[in-house]
Image (cartoon, helix red, strand yellow):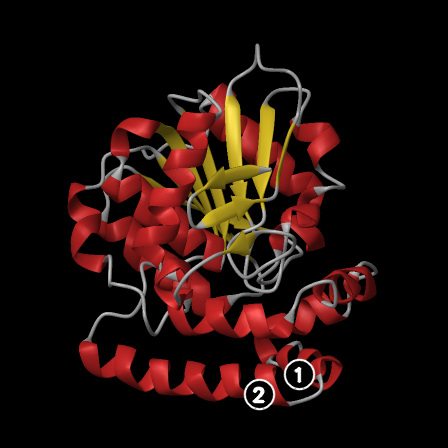
């Protein structure tokens, strides 16, 4: 556990501190256990640090809801790295965790050597888009607080974005892990760390200089389009389309996911030409 005033992070760190550390950030409604099946493979090459983000898993936040937002969460994660004496590391983020990872890399570029974003975006471009999305996030948060959580999960994963995940053998295991979260805490995360409330990072991409791998699934056309635009704006970003997967690549095609990460971080084969 890490206790820094308003945060008590639940985290796991593999013991091989002689290897380069990779910090892994999960998506909305996930937790650090989302990577439990693939940590053994990654830990052959890296020291793996997984964290339950605010509102998720066993992490606890004390104080007002502002401590769930992106700037404060990012600062708390940097404090955690400092506490663990990790001066510089690799950084991975999936979906919501990918948006947070990009924010971290842009605002603390000296702390990360390379980053990998899976099915992520720089946020919404305009105030109008963010305002509309924020209103939508508030309605979803209200459902989390006041409706049956299992029904919420059913509706959430019934979105077209998760069609290929629903057909995967591990889907029921994924959905079961979501039930380990507290819906009231998830609602706070959605309101404050959701895409409707985060600052847009689109105008920062042209100055972003950390080597970045943008992983998107073969079936995820929406995020293929978003990440292709990101690649065009950022000289140091490269899109990698992972076959036989949709939005949740690390679950749907973990073999290609691990291989792509190792190739990018160690072998350096995922480069722009």
The disc at residue 19 is: none
Residue 219 located left or right of residue 81: right
Where does the image place residue 98, in percent across and percent down from the top left? 44, 52
Considering depth in this image, is 9 or 112 the residue closer to the camera?
9
Residue 113 located left or right of residue 38: left
Query: Label 2, on which residue?
Result: 143
Do we see residue 58 in this rendering?
A: yes
Q: Residue at x 38, y 23 (%)?
A: 88
Where does the image place residue 179, in percent across and percent down from the top left? 74, 68
Looking at the rendered image, the disc whose residue lies closer to the viewer, 2 or 1, is: 2
Verify CB contact (< 8 Å) between mark 2 and mark 1.
Answer: yes
Where does the image place residue 107, in percent across and percent down from the top left? 24, 42
Label 2 neighbour load within 10 Å: few <14, some 14-19, many 20+: some
- Image quarter hosting the C terminus: top left
Query: Label 1, on which residue?
Result: 152
Considering depth in this image, is 213 or 191 the residue closer to the camera?
191
Residue 162 located left or right of residue 273: right
Q: Residue at x 58, y 51 (%)?
A: 59
Residue 217 found in image quarter: bottom right
Considering depth in this image, is 185 or 129 the residue closer to the camera?
185
Residue 224 found in image quarter: bottom left
CA distance for labels 2 and 1: 7 Å
Residue located farthest toward the top when viewing the structure as drawn: 18
């Amino acid at each position: 556990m890490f206790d820094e005033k308003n945060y008590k992070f639940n985290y796991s760190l593999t013991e091989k501190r002689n290897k380069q550390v990779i910090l892994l950030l999960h998506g909305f409604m996930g937790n650090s256990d989302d990577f439990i099946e693939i940590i053994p493979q990654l830990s052959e090459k890296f020291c793996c640090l997984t964290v339950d983000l605010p509102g998720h898993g066993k992490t606890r936040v004390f104080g007002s809801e502002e401590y769930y937002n992106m700037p404060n969460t990012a600062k708390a994660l940097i404090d955690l790295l400092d506490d663990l004496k990790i001066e510089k590391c690799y950084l991975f983020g999936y979906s919501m965790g990918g948006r947070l990872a990009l924010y971290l890399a842009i605002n603390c570029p000296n702390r990360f050597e390379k980053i990998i974003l899976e099915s992520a975006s720089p946020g919404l471009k305009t105030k109008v888009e963010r305002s509309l999305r924020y209103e939508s996030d508030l309605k979803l948060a209200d459902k989390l607080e006041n409706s049956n959580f299992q029904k919420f999960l059913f509706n959430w994963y019934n979105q077209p974005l998760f069609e290929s995940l629903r057909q995967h053998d591990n889907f029921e295991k994924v959905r079961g892990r979501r039930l380990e979260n507290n819906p009231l805490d998830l609602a706070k995360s959605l309101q404050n760390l959701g895409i409707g409330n985060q600052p847009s990072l689109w105008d920062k991409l042209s100055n972003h200089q950390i080597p970045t791998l943008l992983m998107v699934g073969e079936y995820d056309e929406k995020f293929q389009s978003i990440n292709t635009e990101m690649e065009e704006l950022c000289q140091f970003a490269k899109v990698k389309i992972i076959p036989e997967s949709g939005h949740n690549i690390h679950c749907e095609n973990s073999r290609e996911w691990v291989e792509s990460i190792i190739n990018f971080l160690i072998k350096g084969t995922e480069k722009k030409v």
